[in-house]
Image: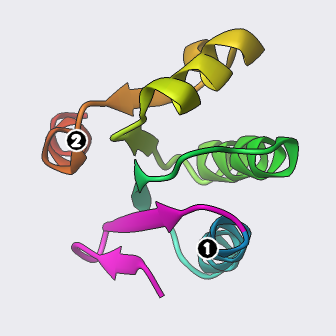
């Protein structure tokens, strides 16, 4: 499982292309039901996202907001970034260049 517990309050999720991405997002959703934490989603090895993945990301974001937690997306490649731009989700999610910067942004907040 690519969910890495960085600390008690922060997890880093290293996502991969489907079908693994759907499973990873489901595991993250299950984890949010059990505990409150902030998450960094690393898109470094993701080459495409489908509408199902986008819907799951929006659902996760809403769950995190309800728990007063943050979710940061990082290492988003050009093709994936284009999808976020076209759908308007670039204004919905917080983005960072890499995992280190994303972790730092969570510590500052």
The answer to whether residue 42 of the structure is visible from this angle is no
Q: Residue at x 33, y 78 (%)?
A: 4
Q: Percent x, y for residue 104?
A: 14, 42
Residue 7 vs residue 92, the one in the foreground: 92
- The boundaries of the magenta stretch are 1-18
Q: Tell me, what colour scheme is on the image? A: rainbow
Res 10 seen here: yes
Task: Indicate which disc residue 24 carries.
Answer: 1
Q: Quadrant of residue 20?
A: bottom right
Q: How many marks?
A: 2
Query: Residue 81, labelled with which disc?
Result: none
Locate residue 69 relative to residue 104 in the image: left or right: right
Could you tell me residue 106's position as x and y percent? 26, 43
Residue 97 placement (x, y as % from top left)? 25, 31
Question: What is the C-alpha distance between the residues marked 2 and 1?
Answer: 19 Å
Q: Which residue occupies 62% across, 12% down? A: 85
Say if the magenta span includes residue 40: no
Q: Secondary structure at mark 2?
A: loop
Q: Where is 91 relative to 80, above or below?
A: above
Q: Is residue 14 magenta?
A: yes
Residue at numbered disc 2: 98
Foreground residue, 76 or 96? 76
Task: Tell me residue 57's x, y (percent).
Answer: 69, 47
> Residue drawn 43% across and 41% down?
73
Viewer-proximal residue among 52 and 64: 52
Question: Does residue 46 appear to the left or right of 92 in the view shown?
Answer: left
Quadrant in which residue 61 is drawn: top right
Which element carries disc 1, helix, strand or loop?
A: helix
Residue 103 in the figure: left or right of residue 70 = left
Earlier in the chain: of badge 2 and badge 1, it is 1
Is the residue under label 1 in contact with that under label 2 (CB below 8 Å)? no
Disc 1 packing (10 Å; few <14; some 14–19; many ≥20): many
């Amino acid at each position: 499982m690519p969910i890495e517990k960085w600390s008690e309050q922060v997890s880093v999720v290293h996502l991969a292309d489907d079908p693994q991405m759907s499973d990873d997002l489901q595991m993250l959703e299950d984890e949010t039901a059990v505990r409150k934490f902030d998450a960094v989603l690393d898109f470094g090895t993701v080459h495409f996202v489908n509408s199902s993945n986008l819907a799951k990301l929006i659902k996760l974001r809403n769950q995190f907001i309800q728990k007063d937690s943050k979710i940061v997306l990082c290492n988003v490649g050009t093709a994936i970034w284009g999808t976020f731009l076209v759908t308007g989700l670039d204004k919905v999610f917080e983005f960072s260049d890499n995992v280190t910067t994303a972790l730092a942004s969570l510590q500052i907040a």
